[in-house]
Image (cartoon, rainbow, N blue to C red):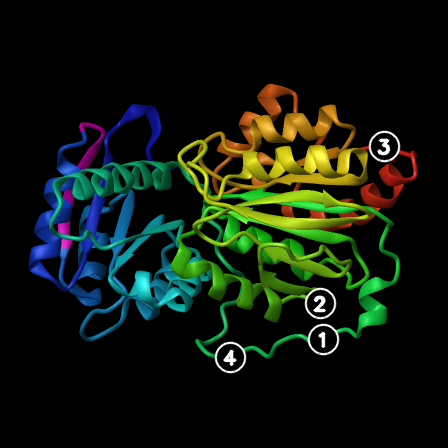
Amino acid sequence: MRNPGGAKVRVLIVDDSAHVRQLLTEILRKDPAIEVVGTAPDAYAARASIKRLNPDVLTLDVEMPKMDGIQFLRNLMRLRPMPVVMCSSLTEDGAAVTLDALGLGAVDFVTKPKLGAAGSLAGYAAELARKVKMAAHARLRVPLFVPPAGTGEPLPRPNAGERRRAAAPGSLVAIGASTGGTEAIREVLSRVPPGGPAIVITQHIPKAFSGAFAARLNAHSLLEVSEALDGAELRPGHAYLAPGDRHLLVVRDGAVQRIRLDDGPAVQRHRPSVDVMFRSVATAAGRNAVGIILTGMGRDGAAGLLAMRAAGAACIGQDEASSVVWGMPGAAVALGAVESLHPLDAIAARIGALGPARASGREDAA
């Protein structure tokens, strides 16, 4: 933790726009728990400022002169890892760039502020301040090896028979995550064999990003991963990601389970909400389900996971040591919703161990 004892979070703002640097400075200085220690217009000035000012957190633009933010982030995480919140106009339209940044170790992201309505700017200010303070206490996830941008081949796709093989009848896995979740979910799905049960996923993510995120998960998994469609039947060997602006629910339709997408109000400030998905799985699948709560800020998913556990589902959480932010798993533990905690790299194996055992009435020791 870089910010002990309740000291102010010291922030360096890196952006090529003088107007944006001024606006972000004004926004963050209004929060009494934050101190803006400096600003920098490009990566080279940022490097000098980091050495001189030793900030707790960086806000970093993607598109800058001399060296773009992604290359700077790659160098930073290799030479001097520190919490980074990406902040760029490209993060709204260029979802792939934002996901690259999160893959390189950035803690979170915000879009650049939209000038105009005061209410919109007030909401943005609250989000930015909240994420900057959270980043100061986050556990950095620094990749051991970061391939150059644009490299990496998609995994070979299994055939339909491989996807069906070994899937427990009626079994279902539900995964919920927020901050740090894009990489945590990718890590879990990359380890799940193609014959596993259907998986539904809610990750707090904007509408513009969920399609690109699903495509990225699909390229790094032996499962068929897609953005969820309303009415789709859940199939073994497939994973379904909630769209960035709609709740994902699982409903029973005779002998099959289907996805229902819902435009209802935000729950725990989020749409999609993990609580909404978990509660629906508790009703639709009961003990034939596994609930998994991963890294994330806040409490979304804790009450829903408790409902799943009460319905007989196996309920596990990511442990504190491997979580970027242990808010959601920690809240679930406090409620008594979690049966056991596991490091991120062991969760996929627990899916295989718990699903068939719970569905058949046997329970392995957690």
* Label 4 secondary element: loop
Q: Which residue is labeled 2 in the image?
A: 222
At 84% across and 63% down in the image, what residue appears?
Answer: 164
Q: Name the secondary structure under disc 1.
A: loop
> Image quarter for residue 266?
top left
Q: Amino acid at mark 3?
A: Ala
Structural distance between the alpha carbons of marks 1 and 3: 33 Å
Tell me the residue that label 1 is attached to.
Answer: 157
Camera-side residue of 187 and 298: 298
Residue highlighted by disc 3: 365
| Residue drawn at the location 77% of the way across and 61% of the way down | 193
Mark 2 or mark 3, whichever is nearer to me = 2
Q: CA distance from mark 4 to mark 3?
A: 41 Å
Is residue 39 something one can see in this rendering? yes
Which is in the foreground here, disc 4 or disc 2?
2
Question: In whole angstroms, how far apart are the C-alphas of marks 1 and 2?
Answer: 6 Å
Magenta stretch: give its range: 32-39
What is the distance, in whole Å, between disc 2 and disc 3 at their CAs?
27 Å
Q: Nearer the viewer, mark 4 or mark 1?
A: 1
Task: Please tell me whether residue 109 belongs to the stretch shown in magenta.
Answer: no
